[in-house]
Amino acid sequence: MEILNLSLPATNRFASHYLEQSVEIQSFFHYRFNDQQEDMKRIAELSSRSFPRKEVAAHIEGFMERFPSSDAVKNSLEKLKANNSAVVIGGQQAGILTGPLYSIHKVISIIKLAEQKERQLGIPIIPVFWIAGEDHDFQEVNHIFVPCAGRVDKWTYPEKVHQKKMVSDITLNKDICLSWVENLIKNFGETEHTNNLLEFADVQITKSPTFVDFFANIIMELFKDYGLLIVDSGNKDFRQIQKDFFKEQIDQHEAITFSLLEQQKQITENGFPITIEANEKAANLFYYNKRANERILLEYDREIDCFVGKSGAITFTKEELLVLADENPAVLSNNVVTRPLMQECLFPTIAFIAGPGEIAYWAELKLVFEHFHLKMPPIVPRLNITFLDRSVETDISELKLDLMEILKNGTEQEKEKFLAAIKDKELAELFSRTIEQLGNQYKLIEAKTEQLDRSLMPMLKKNESYLLKEIGFMQSKLENAVKLKHDVLLKKYARIDLALRPDGFPQERVWNVFYYLNKHGLSFMNKVMAGTFEFDGRHKVLKV
């Protein structure tokens, strides 16, 4: 599989500066990425700290028993227990059918970087994927987009979830899910791989009681041979290991918020926008109300010296919350500020794989980490990948388009140039003169109507408007006849956009991996994984 490396800007300005490793951006981080000397400093730092390696490894081993496994997975579990091992880690929400392609790209990034770091550094490096099962925004994970009749079509999973349940607690109706997935796959169009993919989906659904399990089963079936380990932040047993860190966060909640706001000031002063919404009341902690099946964000009310949620409907003193963290940590969960902190306390992290948005919000956490005498891990931009089908590549070549320009802006500008070139100028001039002459004649008729009967003026205006509309209709028909002569070429522009820049967005933010598995087979991911990837910030175009 041929890989092209292209220099494209990131999807936000901050991430673009980070890829360039500019001095002003680097001051918000503790380490530079893609620097082996920095890696050695990080290893030295990790070796001076203690981690609950055996507890975490034992939990992951138990958690992963129900998912597809391999000797490589077992080997990773053993490596995680070693005192000199480290992890490459990253995470994502549990989207239906794995969600947009960037979730798959993140998994690929974690595995490939772990392999690379292990070769370079000579210590055991384990790839770990953190499923954000504690997230409760079901609307973000319950749909995918599919190509349908030359356009982007949104397919939403039909089951409704009305409470703010954690995704880990959302059960899967297997009959509804299977019917929905079968219709979706068939909508892709039948190929030699369709029946195998339908069978694959059936197996994963049958053994998945929840949304997170469905996500995890697919991920592990695709990547089990690469030693990938997975954790679910929403798993109640996992949070038992986190109880001491929860208590520390509760005890230091004001310092965490103060540090965050101070760091945000520095970023704002450097001309960059803030990505984490926060105020002085932020407690950076969620409480899970079992009765209401609802995840509630807590704030700290200084006037009553309590943690409150839902406008005061839920109230805890600091002492009550500390007892809760010790006795029942399953009802607590982190937010975007404290999740990276919790991750850092659990895993000896040599690199965190981040998307463009994550790079921006990690920069806001530097002082938070320093408050706990910790350093943020090296933040490595995940691989940005575009799959380029050979037929689409042929279309690009025939139209003499620039691939980099397409990936940045789509084909609209070039298509407009083409339409201007094929436009029948004589026809356009004829209609232009006709409209002008009609307007001049109606001015004369208006003047006469003013003299004879002013009450007929509205009818005259309506009559003129009707004629102009009819002329415009005819002009449109004739212009479409010209376009029809070039329909084959115009469809190529549309096909390129749909494949590489659907609805004006990067491919990885719209399309789902099942479209490619249906087209290229279940071995598609193995072919992708056989490629050599450089973590140099450049965009990877894979010709498939």
Image (cartoon, helix red, strand yellow):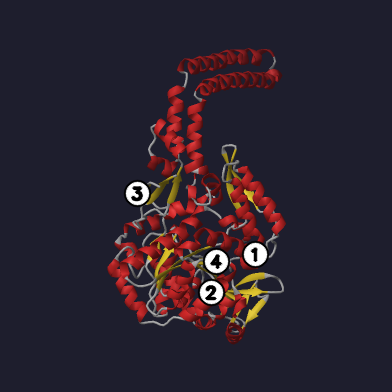
Q: Disc 2 or 1, which lies upstream in sequence?
A: 2
Q: Give how far apart the Cα atoms at labels 3 and 1 are.
A: 40 Å
Q: Residue furthest left?
A: 37
98 over 425 or under it: above or below: below
Residue drawn 70% across the image and 62% down it = 162
Question: What amino acid type should be assigned to the residue bearing mark 3?
Answer: Ser
Q: Nearer the viewer, mark 3 or mark 1?
A: 1
Residue 125, position in %: x, y? 39, 70
Q: Give how far apart the Cα atoms at labels 2 and 3 are.
A: 40 Å
Residue at disc 3, secondary structure? loop
Label pair 4/1, CB-CB below 8 angstroms: no
Q: Disc 4 or 1, which lies upstream in sequence?
A: 4
Q: Residues within 10 Å of mark 3 (few under 14, many from 20)?
A: few
Q: Give how far apart the Cα atoms at labels 2 and 1 are.
A: 19 Å
Residue at disc 2, secondary structure? helix
Q: Disc 3 or 4, which lies upstream in sequence?
A: 3
Q: Disc 3 or 1, which lies upstream in sequence?
A: 3
